Every structure is written in structure tokens, then in C-alpha cells.
């Protein structure tokens, strides 16, 4: 069962994508919801709003604890911002701090708010690289990555897809395209999850 954080943003699109892969999903709004899922998706939206809401309901702590125990987490766009350790130029904006990286918000310029691009995606595990379709909407990129972070995709040299053990993050939105490659990759991570739940 994959939970999709449903406080704000494009959570419906993630559910539809996973539905297409035959994977059951549930909307997560409380710690009780979180306790029922095997993995969590943090959707795109407005990262400042989402972190405030997470904090208000104490879901930030609950997510951090489950992540430390090994729960797989996938963040897209604002979700990637929420996962990063720090935000370039905004030391005051809190995050969940699970991804050993610094993120730059709204990083592709103001003139072009959104665009679509093909991103070469490294699947690893002896699987061939794939090209995935991504939609970028006021998207971030990772300006710095630390130990344990593996780059899965770049756009024009900028890091836009990474994995750190049970954590996956993309600056773009595959859930708004017809391309289920990245979601299938995450489902594979969830199936291989070694989270210990007591
Ligand atoms: N720019 C947004 C933010 O900083 C993210 C945009 C998105 O999720 N599509 O939160």
C-alpha cells in the first residue's frame, strides 16, 4: 500500500499513475493514515505550504521516524524540496531533511515557468538506461549532493533525479505524463524494502 501525502498539490495524479500499475494507494493526511502505508509519495505543490501543514499536524516527525526505519519515500518537485537537507539561499525555510543534498528552488528561471523534456534515467541493477518524459513546473534542481546520493538523471547538466537508499526524488513530474517508468521504479524499491516495523 503506497500512501500519497494529500495536504496540498497534485496527489491525485500520483494515485492515478499507481492505479494504472495496479498498485493500491491511499491518501495520507494524518499520522494514523501514515501508519497504514508501506511507502510514501510527497507530491508537487507549494513546498512552504506543505511543510507548514506537516508541522502543524506533527506529520513531519512521523515521516522522519518511518524513514529512519527504512520506509521508502519518493518526492516530486515540491516533494524533492521537502526532502532536501537545505535550501539554497533560504536557511530559514524548514524541510524534512532526509536527502543529503542542497536544493535550489524555482531554478530554471522565471521566463519559462514550465516545460517538458526527455530525461535519460539510470535504472541501475544491470537494467538499461531509459528515457523518461518529465514535466518541469517552477522546478528545483539539486545544486549539491553529499555521500550516499546517486544521480539517476540530469537535464542540461543539472541534477534532477536522485536516489539515496530508500529515497527517490525527481525535480520533474512524471505523474503528469503518460510515462510510468519512474513510478514503476519506485514500486520496485517498495517491493525490495527492508523496513522493520514493530
Ligand atoms: N516552486 C514550487 C516550490 O518551491 C514547486 C513547484 C512544483 O511542485 N511544481 O514549492
Image (cartoon, rainbow, N blue to C red):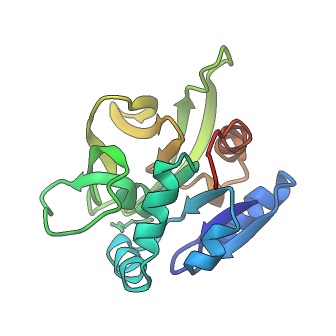
In the image, 100 versus 139, the foreground residue is: 100
On screen, residue 18 versus residue 103, left or right, reads: right
Residue 108 appears anywhere in the view: no
Residue drawn at (50%, 44%), measured in percent from left and top? 167
Examine the rendered structure and indicate whether residue 14 appears above or below residue 148: below
| Residue 11: % across, % down | 61, 71
Q: Where is residue 171 shown, x and y percent of the image?
A: 43, 50
Classify residue 122 by image quadrant.
Answer: top right
Q: Is residue 14 left or right of residue 8?
A: right
Displayed-image quarter of ligand 1: bottom left
Does residue 116 lie above or below 28 as drawn?
above
Q: Is residue 100 left or right of residue 87?
A: right
Left or right relative to 98: residue 128: right
Residue at the limit of the structure toward the bottom, as seen here: 56
Instruction: Tell me the quadrant of the picture where the N terminus can be found.
Output: bottom right
> Where is residue 42 drawn, in percent x and y?
52, 63
Q: Quadrant of residue 198?
A: bottom right
Q: In this orientation, which residue lies closer to the viewer: 163 or 135?
A: 163
Q: What residue is rendered at 45% in x and 37% in y?
A: 162
* Outermost residue to the top: 126
As drawn, 132 above or below 134: above
With respect to residue 178, does 28 lie above or below?
Answer: below
Residue occupying the point 40% across, 68% down: 61
Q: Is residue 12 visible?
A: yes
Which residue occupies 52% across, 57% down? Answer: 66
Amino acid at each position: 500500500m503506497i500512501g500519497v501525502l494529500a495536504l496540498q498539490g497534485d496527489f491525485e495524479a500520483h494515485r492515478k499513475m499507481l492505479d494504472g500499475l495496479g498498485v493500491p494507494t491511499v491518501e495520507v493526511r494524518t499520522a494514523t493514515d501514515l501508519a497504514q502505508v508501506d511507502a510514501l509519495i510527497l507530491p508537487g505543490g507549494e513546498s512552504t505550504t506543505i511543510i507548514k501543514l506537516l508541522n502543524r499536524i506533527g506529520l513531519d516527525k512521523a515521516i522522519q521516524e518511518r524513514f529512519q526505519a527504512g520506509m521508502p519515500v519518493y518526492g516530486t518537485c515540491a516533494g524533492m524540496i521537502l526532502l532536501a537537507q537545505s535550501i539554497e539561499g533560504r536557511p530559514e525555510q524548514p524541510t524534512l531533511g532526509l536527502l543529503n543534498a542542497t536544493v535550489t528552488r524555482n531554478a530554471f528561471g522565471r521566463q519559462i515557468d514550465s516545460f517538458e523534456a526527455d530525461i535519460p534515467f539510470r535504472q541501475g541493477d544491470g537494467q538499461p538506461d531509459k528515457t523518461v518524459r518529465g514535466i518541469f513546473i517552477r522546478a528545483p534542481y539539486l545544486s549539491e549532493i553529499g555521500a550516499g546520493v546517486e544521480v539517476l538523471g540530469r537535464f542540461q547538466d543539472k541534477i534532477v533525479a536522485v536516489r539515496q537508499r530508500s529515497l527517490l526524488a525527481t525535480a520533474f513530474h512524471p505523474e503528469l505524463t503518460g510515462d510510468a517508468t519512474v513510478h514503476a521504479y519506485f514500486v520496485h524499491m517498495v517491493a525490495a524494502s527492508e523496513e522493520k516495523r514493530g
